[in-house]
Image (tube, rainbow, N blue to C red):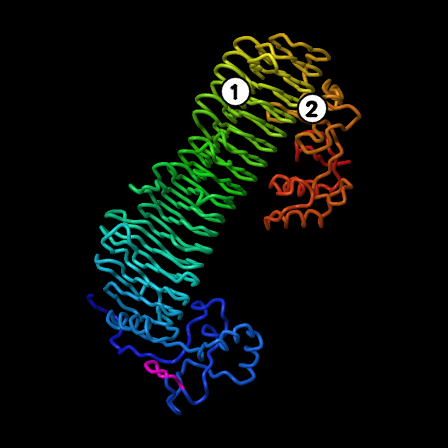
């Protein structure tokens, strides 16, 4: 081992003291916080014998008897450990300035029967430093006070790990405030390796793991231990040379936390973690990592654990052979849970995030408040590959998918997915530009705008052996060869309160293409201004068998166009019973078993040119439906009561002037300065609101301010919100 230092040449010294709090985070005040020192004495670091009246360490503040008693009363449980044979708590401080000093300190610390703190002064330490202990004592390797991690560098010089810490005992491990060069000579070992005991905790904090040009090595290697935290670290890989994984975690049996780190330009993944317990990854930046030739084929992060949480992370420009941002997989048999909350995935090549099951496993997954933008290979995908897998249950709420190639969301046949309140804009794929799904799927209050598919389903493609539900969604300007807005093949399909407008297809179903093997309920939808170069400008109904039941009630399917048959509606096939009743339709092709009580009149939309498809008070579609329609929804697309005047209206919007602005908390059609101020403050602070929409839109705040500054009194004219609230009584 070579030894070289550019720092102070002072002789290493060992003095009495105790480990910092981080070295024993769960034992405040004992071997980690306040220091207990007998007045007039100190312990010699070498033999731990009292030296009478020797000067005390100037860093140690004596604790009074009353203070000591107060501490002990709060730590009664620890006294049991002392009674069972623990000796007086003590720690040894080593202050090192050279490479040899550092190895000496590690060797002594491994055998001295005490907790140890090793402080490094500024310098460049070359060597393959090693600590190996079976004792149950804590170890902290850290920077001297006042010295930053940019002033301390450990370099393995191409001969192996810079620092290897192995402890089979119960002692906790802390490494902080140091720079490690990933100059290991091998892709498969790390500059810092920690192998802690099975009941021990490890903390790596404020370290840098850097890769000089043409070097090889992982950054941080966590090989064992109970619970581990990595925080406030920088882990960057070499852009040339062999590279290696940024952070590799295996053998940790309890909980693992990676937080507030920057993980960038690593080959063979930025983070690789495989543990049986809980993994939390929060507040990190994953930038420009790639999978290299690694078997994981994941650029940003590959994770396998029983419970996984990704929260508040940013993934930008990562590249993977199959998955570029994040990939999560099952660890073993049982139930696995995965949550993605408030993350950003942007410009990743190979997909933003992915979850998959390979074995006899069930996975419960939650996506809340994430942003997926400009990823190739899809925004988010989830897959279950084996027929014996229990399947994946997915809840997707309040996410934004924009400009992803390969689709916004891709889910395979063994998935059950519920999507609520998401926005899909400008995504593209072969099938399912916005969403591609199999299995059971429900769509509620989602918006699909400008998505495209070269095949089928510009907005949504579903090929399900069971149930589909579309409720209160908006499909605008999506395009595909078949099913410009929606392509839906399933056993049962329920479509309620959806707006489908200005979508296009090259073959069939400008707005919707639908085929069910059992039951279809198409109730109170507005399908207008869609076009098809083939047949079925508005909706194309494909009936493939003789048992299907089609129920089409209370819809506005009007103003659509097709170059072939069925400008508004195209029907082919037999089925068992097909009912088309109480609809507004112009161009109808095909023979229905029952087709009565229908209209062919202009719906009188408020402002269709600007996307407002609410009907006016004089519309012939007002109060023109049937309350006896099967599966009649309870509310309309705005969330208001479905029946406002005794008889249901046609289309997705019920004409009503009853709703007040959500800022008007007492619902008196007057917005006061105090009400506006509270509403605006909640929006600015990102808080939710008691009146829907609970997530406050900016244009609602603007409208409330406009009404308030113009006297406060307002009325509702029944048009699109928030411009429906007009000044004056």
Residue that label 2 marks: 615
In this picture, residue 205 sits left or right of residue 242: right
Q: Is residue 45 magenta?
A: yes
2 and 1 marks in contact (CB < 8 Å): no
The image quadrant that residue 65 belongs to is bottom right
Question: Does residue 57 appear in the picture of this structure?
Answer: yes
- Decide: is 641 above or below 176: above
* Label 1: how many Cα within 10 Å (few below 14, some 14–19, many 20+): many
- Residue at 40 percent across and 43 percent down: it is 316
Q: Give the quarter of the image for residue 692.
A: top right
Chief SS of the magenta region: loop
Q: Residue at x 33, y 68 (%)?
A: 133
Q: Position of residue 33 (x, y in %)?
A: 47, 73
User: Which quadrant does the C terminus fall into?
Assistant: top right
Residue appearing at x 44%, y 62% in the figure: 199
Query: Which mark, by number, is residue 483?
Result: 1
Identify the magenta region. Answer: 42-48
């Amino acid at each position: 081992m070579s030894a070289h230092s550019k720092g102070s040449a002072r002789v290493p010294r060992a003095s009495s003291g105790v480990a910092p709090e981080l070295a024993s985070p769960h034992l405040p005040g004992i071997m980690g916080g306040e220091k207990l020192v007998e007045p007039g004495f100190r312990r010699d670091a070498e033999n731990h014998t009292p030296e009478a009246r020797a000067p005390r360490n100037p860093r140690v503040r004596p604790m009074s008897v009353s203070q000591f008693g107060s501490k002990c009363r709060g730590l009664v449980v620890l006294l049991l450990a002392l009674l069972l044979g623990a000796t007086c708590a003590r720690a040894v401080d080593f202050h090192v300035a050279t490479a040899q000093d550092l190895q000496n300190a590690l060797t002594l610390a491994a055998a001295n029967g005490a907790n140890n703190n090793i402080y490094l002064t500024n310098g460049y330490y070359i060597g393959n430093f090693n600590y190996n202990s079976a004792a149950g004592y804590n170890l902290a390797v850290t920077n001297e006070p006042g010295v930053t991690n940019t002033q301390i560098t450990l370099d393995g010089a191409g001969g192996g790990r810079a620092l290897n810490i192995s402890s089979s005992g119960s002692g906790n491990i802390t490494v902080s405030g140091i720079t490690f060069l990933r100059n290991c000579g091998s892709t498969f070992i790390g500059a810092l390796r920690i192998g802690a005991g099975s009941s021990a905790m490890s903390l790596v904090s404020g370290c840098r793991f850097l890769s000089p040009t043409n070097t090889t090595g992982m950054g941080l290697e966590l090989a064992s231990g109970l619970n581990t935290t990595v925080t406030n670290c920088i882990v960057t890989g070499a852009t040339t040379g062999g590279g290696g994984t940024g952070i590799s975690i295996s053998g940790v049996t309890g909980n693992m936390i990676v937080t507030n780190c920057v993980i960038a330009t690593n080959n063979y993944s930025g983070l690789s973690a495989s543990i049986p317990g809980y993994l939390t990854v929060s507040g990190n930046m994953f930038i420009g990592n790639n999978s290299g030739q690694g078997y994981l084929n994941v650029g940003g992060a590959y994770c396998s654990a029983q419970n996984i949480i990704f929260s508040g992370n940013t993934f930008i420009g990562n590249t993977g052979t199959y998955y570029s941002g994040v990939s999560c997989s099952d660890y073993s048999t049982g139930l696995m849970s995965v949550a993605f909350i408030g993350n950003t995935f942007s410009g990743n090549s190979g997909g933003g995030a992915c979850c998959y099951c390979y074995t006899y496993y069930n996975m419960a997954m939650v996506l809340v408040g994430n942003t997926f933008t400009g990823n190739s290979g899809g925004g988010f995908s989830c897959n279950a590959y084996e027929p014996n897998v229990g399947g994946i249950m997915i809840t997707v709420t309040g996410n934004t998918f924009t400009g992803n190639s390969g689709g916004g969301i891709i889910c395979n046949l063994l998935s059950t997915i519920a999507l609520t309140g998401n926005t899909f804009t400008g995504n593209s794929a072969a099938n399912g530009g916005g969403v591609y799904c199999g299995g059971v799927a429900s769509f509620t209050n989602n918006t699909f705008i400008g998505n495209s598919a070269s095949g089928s389903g510009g907005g949504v493609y579903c090929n399900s052996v069971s149930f589909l539900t579309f409720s209160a969604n908006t499909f605008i300007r999506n395009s595909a060869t078949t099913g410009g807005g929606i392509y839906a093949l399933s056993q049962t399909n329920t479509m309620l309160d959806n707006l489908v407008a200005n979508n296009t297809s090259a073959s069939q179903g400008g707005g919707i293409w639908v085929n069910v093997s059992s039951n279809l309920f198409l109730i109170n939808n507005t399908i207008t201004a869609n076009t098809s170069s083939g047949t079925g400008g508005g909706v194309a109904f494909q009936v493939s068998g003789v048992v299907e039941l089609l129920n089409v009630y209370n819809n506005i399917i009007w103003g659509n166009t097709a170059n072939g048959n069925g400008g508004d509606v195209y029907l082919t096939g037999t089925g068992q019973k097909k009912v088309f009743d109480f609809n507004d339709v112009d161009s109808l092709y095909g023979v229905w078993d029952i087709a009565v009580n229908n209209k062919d009149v202009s719906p009188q939309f408020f402002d269709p040119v600007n996307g407002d498809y609410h009907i006016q008070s004089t519309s012939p579609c007002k109060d023109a439906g049937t309350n006896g329609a099967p599966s009649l929804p309870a509310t309309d697309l705005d969330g208001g009561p479905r029946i406002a005047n005794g008889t249901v209206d046609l289309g997705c919007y019920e004409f009503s002037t009853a709703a007040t602005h959500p800022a008007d908390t007492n619902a008196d059609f007057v917005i006061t300065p105090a009400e506006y101020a509270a509403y605006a403050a909640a929006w600015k602070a990102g808080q939710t609101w008691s009146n829907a929409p609970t997530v406050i839109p900016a244009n609602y705040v603007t409208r409330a301010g406009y009404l308030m500054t113009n006297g406060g009194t307002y009325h509702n004219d029944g048009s699109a919100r928030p411009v429906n609230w007009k000044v004056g009584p």
